[in-house]
Image: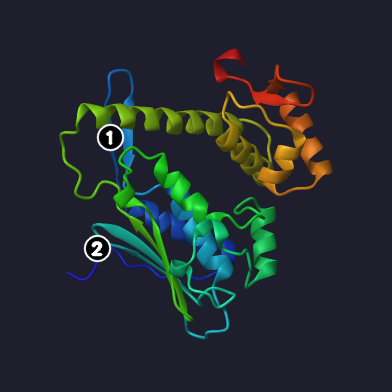
Amino acid sequence: MDAFDSSEFTGSIIKLLEDGMSFIKRNTKMMWRKAPTSRIEMPEYADRSCLEALVNALVHRSYLELGSEIHIDIFDDRMTIYSPGGMADGSIIQNQKLNEVSSKRRNPVLADVFSRLGYMERQGSGLEKIIEWYQVCANYTEEKMPTFSSTSSQFIVTLPNLNYGNKTVLSEKKQDSDIEKTGLSTKKQDYEDLLNTLSLTTPTHNNIMALFNQFGFSEPFTRSDIVSVCGITKSPASSLLNLMKRFNLIIPANKGYGQYIFQDLEQR
């Protein structure tokens, strides 16, 4: 058997993104097991990492190579997302540290559109985000870290299957670690569920989630932090602060004027 599922998609860039994510969800599974006070979900792949990788492929690919396509290949132990065209500056990604990769965009207009729609950040930190979302998954280990490779004509993101080859019986230490990671993931999901009930635009929703992922319920932040994390100017940052106050999402921090923290869901 060559494949269980094979699909080709055409249409606008946004439709390609939506169809690509639907294909990934259709061909991956969610495992779970009971914990003393919760249920630990164990996805094969971090959903947000898949989204970041696919956005990266669509925004930064070379559209000058006629007949070329983006490929999503899902194997037993991994998923690969192939994009035509290497790094925009001609460098080789595997020879660099991710935090030192320069943010040079091959298609700046596409990047600006996706940024305004809330699908990517202006800082160009997508590759690091792919790894960060993996690290909060229950079965993540260093061996399951996403990897990136490029040549002059292609860019490939490899996402390991987090559940492939895992033993059924986990050590007590590993179980505690999984519960802690799941707690973090559950908090993110609960907060995202709350935002989905509010009348927010997609960019605003994603900016608030980016702040929450960065600071959580305990770490204070300022308008300058919003500018840095969200990649916006001071005026939109002030507007975002006022909106979060209006929806009772944040409260003043005790550490000083102009600092805020996210309000615990149980205290809203």
Judge depth for marks 1 and 2 and give the one in front: 1
In front here: 195 or 96?
96
Residue 166 image point, x, y percent? 20, 44
Spatial distance from mark 1 to mark 2, Cα to Cα?
23 Å
User: Left or right of 28: which side holds 93?
Assistant: right
Residue 5 marker: none
Residue 81 image point, x, y percent? 41, 65
Residue 49 image point, x, y percent? 45, 51
Residue 100 visible in this rendered orientation of the protein: yes
Residue density around tag 1, few if under 14, some if 14–19, many if 20 or more, within 10 Å:
few
Compared to residue 182, the image places residue 50 above or below, namely below
Quarter placement of the N terminus:
bottom left
Three-letter code for the amino acid on which mark 1 is drawn = Trp
In front here: 219 or 205?
219
In front here: 31 or 160?
160
The residue identified by callout 1 is: 32
Three-letter code for the amino acid on which mark 2 is drawn = Phe
The residue identified by callout 2 is: 4
- Colour mode of the rendering: rainbow
**Quadrant location of residue 39?**
top left
Residue 129 image point, x, y percent? 51, 50
Residue drawn where x is 34% and y is 27% of the image:
179
Compared to residue 265, the image places residue 232 above or below, namely below
